[in-house]
Image (cartoon, helix red, strand yellow):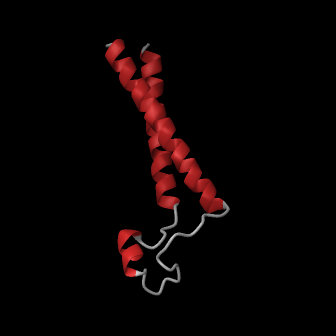
Amino acid sequence: MQRIEQALVIMQVVVAILLITGVLLQTPKATGLGGTIGGGGDSGLGGGYRTRRGLERQIYYSTWVLLVVFFIVSVTNFWFSVHHPT
């Protein structure tokens, strides 16, 4: 059981790093709430909704998948720590 717990911790760290990277790689829409309400200045984005295309869409969906994987690994890690104390 110790090896499973160690593997889960390593997996959680790796997925967390990938998740952080995915969030940082995403392009900002209109710099958050201020850009949406204020119109976004002269950025040319219009401050509204725009569709994701190509690599931007792939990074977006991959980030969501990583979020779900991180949640599952975290819950599994918690379950192992509660039901199989060291």
Q: Position of residue 45 (x, y in %)?
A: 52, 78
Q: Position of residue 3 (x, y in %)?
A: 46, 18
Which residue shows up at 48% across the image and 47% down it? 19
Count of labels in the image? 0
Nearer to the camera, 55 or 1: 55
Which residue shows up at 51% across the image and 36% down it? 69
In the image: residue 63, left or right of residue 40: right
Which residue shows up at 49% across the image and 39% down it? 68
- What residue occupies the far bottom of the structure in this picture? 42
Nearer to the camera, 70 or 50: 50
> With respect to residue 57, does 29 lie above or below?
below
> With respect to residue 62, does 42 lie above or below?
below
Which residue shows up at 47% across the image and 87% down it? 42
Quarter containing the N terminus: top left
In the image: residue 30, left or right of residue 50: left
Q: Position of residue 4 (x, y in %)?
A: 47, 19
Q: Position of residue 23 (x, y in %)?
A: 47, 55
Quarter containing the C terminus: top left
> With respect to residue 56, does 61 lie above or below?
above
- What residue occupies the far right of the structure in this picture? 54
Nearer to the camera, 43 or 10: 43
Quadrant position of residue 76: top left
Quadrant position of residue 13: top left
